[in-house]
Image (spheres, grey):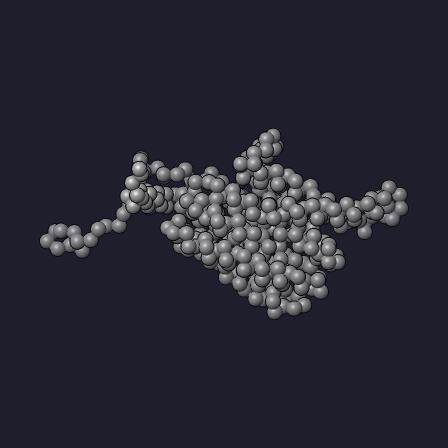
Amino acid sequence: MTRGGEQLTVPPAEFASYYGRPVLKPPVWKYDIAGYLFTGGLAAGSALIGAGAQLTGRPGLRAVGRWAALGGVAASTFLLVHDLGRPARFHHMLRVAKVTSPMSVGTWILAAFGPLAGVAAVAELAPLLPQHGLLGLACRIAPPLGNVAGLAAAVTAPALATYTGVLLADTAVPSWHDAYPSLPFVFAGSALAAASGVGLIAAPAAETAPLRRLALAAAAIELGGGHRLERQGLTSEPYTHGRSGRLVTAGRALVTVGTVTALVSRRSRVLSAISGAALVASSLATRFGVFEAGRVSARDPKYTVVPQRERLDARSTARRKAPPSR
């Protein structure tokens, strides 16, 4: 709006960088990594469910948890190697162990978890083996080995479920970096939701009572972390706007629907399947939404420039208010 040729309003600020290049180099990760985030969480949550079922005498749920853990970690490893481009690169990451590097720690967690999940799952095949001879010996040894491996996998599972949140927050990508207090909780809840969903779909209905309580806990953790995720200032904007915001919102709605349906499903196979599908879909939407939000914030300079200016202004104000040193 103008009057007499004079502009009365300040135009919206436009943030740009030299030669039109972004302030930050956007993540080179492809959507393979978004899938890796999902499958790794599914594997971790399933290992915990398998161990819990083992300790409480639920063989059907134990088998589902173990096989889901193996399938999840296998898919996760494939997606990671595919994103790296060459399988040898994954091997090279195991040459060193750096506790200060989330990527290095995560690689070692994945390398430890995978064989344990594999032994636990393969042990479920023991009843199919002959009872005599060499295979009979394997039939007798496999169950106790599987029990030990299943419990060991469950010990490493919490780290597998949450380290990817730490990994994203350790980058310079604004919407990931500023979410460091929340992302591990969001990913932990998402992992439990996905694993509970698979269990509700595939496990015997008579053994799924713990999954309904676990789905409720998963929803509380994920929704609580998500609430904080969207209250971190300007860099939370991609979690509520655009394609990434729609994915995150869909994840929140689906985990709510899945949890409520799980609580009323009792032993209904139909309701359990609907609940399970909603919980798995919620985890998938959340992981892809968080991944896309980071890509959006890296492409737009305002998510880097504005918070930097705010921090500089806050420091300047603090210095002016500080008492003079003697």
Measured as percent of width and height from the top left, residue 110 is found at 62, 41
The answer, for residue 171, to whether it is visible in the render is yes
Q: Say if 88 sits above or below 253 in the image.
A: above
**Left or right, 155 with reference to 180:** right
Residue under the image location 54 percent in, 39 percent down: 102
Residue under the image location 56 percent in, 36 percent down: 99
Which image quadrant is residue 280 in?
Answer: bottom right
The answer, for residue 86, to whether it is visible in the render is no
Measured as percent of width and height from the top left, residue 36 is found at 56, 45
Quadrant occupied by the N terminus:
bottom left
Comparing 40 with 164, the one in front is: 164
Furthest residue toward front: 326
**Left or right, 200 with reference to 128:** left
Quadrant occupied by the C terminus:
top left
Furthest residue toward left: 4
Residue under the image location 39 percent in, 38 percent down: 24
Residue under the image location 56 percent in, 52 percent down: 188
Comparing 113 with 84, the one in front is: 113
Q: Say if 118 sits above or below 215 in the image.
A: above
Q: How many marks?
A: 0
Comparing 259 with 104, the one in front is: 104
Which image quadrant is residue 283 in?
Answer: bottom right
Measured as percent of width and height from the top left, residue 136 is found at 86, 45
Q: Say if 240 sits above or below 14 in the image.
A: below
Measured as percent of width and height from the top left, residue 105 is found at 58, 38
